[in-house]
Image (cartoon, rainbow, N blue to C red):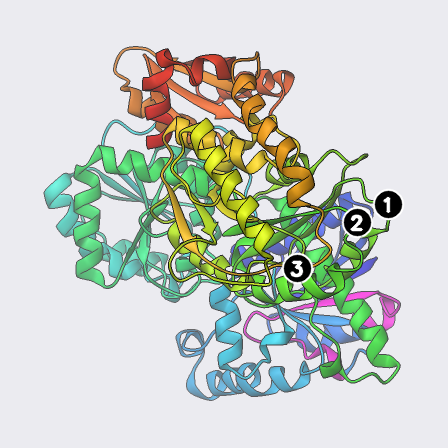
Amino acid sequence: MKVVFLAWRDLANPLAGGSEVLIDRLAAGLTERGHDVTLVAGGPVGERPYRVIDAGGRFGQYLRAPAIVERQLRDTDLVVDVANGMSYLTPLWHRRPSVCFVNHVHTEQWRLWFKPPLAAVGRTIERSVTPRVYRHRLFIAVSPSTAEALEGIGVDPNQIRIVPNGVDLAPPAAPKSAEPLFLTLGRLVPHKRVDTLLPIWDRVRAEVGGRLVIVGDGPEEARLRAMAGPGVEFTGHVSEEEKQRLLAQAWLLIHPSMLEGWGLVITEAAAAGTPSLAFDAPGVRDSIANGESGVLATDEDDLTKHWIDLASDWRRRSELAIGARRRATQFSWDATIDRFLEVADEATARRRVASRGAPLAARPSAVPLRAPAVLFGAAPEVSIVVPAYNEAERLPRSLPLLLDAARRFDSEIIVVDDGSTDGTADLATRLLADALRPSVLRLPENRGKGAAVRAGVARATGRNIVFMDADLATDVGHIGDVLDALNTAHVAVGNRAAPGSVITGATQSRRVIGRLFNEWARAVTGTDLADFQCGFKGFRAPVAKILFDLSQVDGFAFDVDVLALAHRIGYRTVELPVRWHAVEGGHVRPVRDAPGMALSVVQSRLRWANHHSVAAIRAAAGRGWEREDVAAALTALLPGPGTIIPWRQGAMALLPFVNDPDAARTAVRLQLEQPELEVQSARLAARHLLSSTGRDLRSAIAAA
């Protein structure tokens, strides 16, 4: 594509901030991928890997930029109108596709920057004119807070797409400072509210001592220097290397801003292993996971209290530092560029359809507004796995119902085609076209329902994993019940015999054989469950990964094997009443299949004693490290759903579905990132884990 960005400032501008960094990373990333990118921005401008055109001064650029585009860049595929408060109102003068890119809605900032008459004009254009001019085109927001603010000025939610910031993830550039060191980083401008921080610092310093280092420059610098008391240092603008060193050394990043689009510096601090303390402000609350990667304060007194408490509690700071690093792993510039290209494709396709006269409202939105986890690269709340074998007749009815139910959650849907011969995979791909995270896996041959679910669990990225039959015999409304149950349990299973269950359509013979099979399964496995075979079960993701990697049953009896393993390890399992209707045309024939399933239950117990094993990473540390500290370090260094436990002189991380070469490479990477640890790859044998000698190990895994 040929893409033109219209922006108020280039990265070379002394007042450049997070917005300019984001646009630069997008433009450079698109250029690296072969797209033709031009930035038209107010001066001064610098040399970039993409073309940059100086559009003139602070206000004159709003007249010159349209002329530059129409004279030199008329054949562009997409114009990205970066609205820094004031948009370029591109649809009024450019007929080809455009999107309005908004970091944040300026609201009260207008009065901080301009005198009343000019501030009123800017506020009117932002709140009234831009939404109307762009009413048939897309808006890009950088966070849910920005999206919500756009809705507040009248933008239709169906027009809004979210493209998050990324971050560069590398080992911290320096160790933590031995003395208390707190960092504030950003432009010294009114809405950053650094002036509110200085009186607070006087109170904090009296309790904990140390230094407050303020990095950045801007029009407020002279006033702030005059206000500053002891222990405050101003560095002005620093190099990228120095910034990374300070971010790594700091105990906390203190961020007093009243409003952000996202808060890029917060994510950069998190990547350096430094948590943030900030006011609970729009944008800031999106970049900080409160209580996990940092702390949000409600007012100045609250911020003062948290600052003193965190400065005095190294263990809590360490927990937040680990959470901050984990939070940073959820973002990358590659993912940001991928997401931007998705929106760009939609914007150009949307414009082509609109030019043929199709009403905009009649076209479904490709990406719903509210799905922050996938838009930020984070794990969805739930992965829904649907095994399917020759289900082309039933999927047109069941998948739309599942898709509708899944939209109520931050979810991904994974359909696993178990070697079908009727076009199941192609049909599923078409039916899931509007899903937020559709995934269709094709197994090369029919291997059995257990193998299909196992493949889906291996692919799943959600924090919880639910699998259900393609016929939706169990009411999809129970997905929420399972997620609620998984707040306190490791495994939640549908129980058609539980009080409150509603069962329809089942024949008497099916009921009898089902009861007999469940009695047999309980006797063989020693598991006190009433319904092994209901095709509706949920797991916390780390639990599902371990259980399905250990399970070797490919056929219909896989449920029994997985639940027996869960019981053996000590995972908490709960049964839930369900609404269930027997659907005709299923692949299970109770009379025909029951004997083979019963035999599989016995065989599965024998398989536990074979040489199957799970990949693992073992880490030990020298003097001064507790086992819990090593486990916390592994948690920070290994993003994603995993099981990490304190073990022996250090910690162990289980890596289900990871092969030996990948585990070895991971161990090498961890050793480089944390030289104080002694890291090596290993295998955890099922024979040991499930034997009497593995009791302590099972207890640790179940407690993780």
Q: Is residue 116 above or below residue 272?
A: below
Instruction: Find the distance from the CA under tag 3 to the CA under tag 1.
Output: 21 Å
Q: Position of residue 71 (x, y in %)?
A: 86, 72
Instruction: Tell me where the magenta segment starts and ends, as one range.
Output: 69-92
The residue at the point 74 percent across, 80 percent down is 91
Instruction: Find the distance from the CA under tag 2 to the CA under tag 1.
Output: 6 Å
The quarter of the displayed image where residue 420 is located: top right
Helix, strand or loop status at disc 3: loop
Residue at the disc numbered 3? 583
Circle 1: residue type: Thr
**Front one among 548 and 372:** 548
CB-based contact (under 8 Å), mark 2 and mark 1: yes
The residue at the point 23 percent across, 30 percent down is 179
The first of marks 2 and 1 along the sequence is: 2
Instruction: Find the distance from the CA under tag 3 to the CA under tag 2.
Output: 15 Å
Residue at the disc numbered 2? 390
The single residue placed furthest to the left in the displayed view is 206
The residue at the point 56 percent across, 44 percent down is 513
**Quadrant of the image containing the N terminus:** bottom right
**What numbered label is drawn on residue 421?**
1
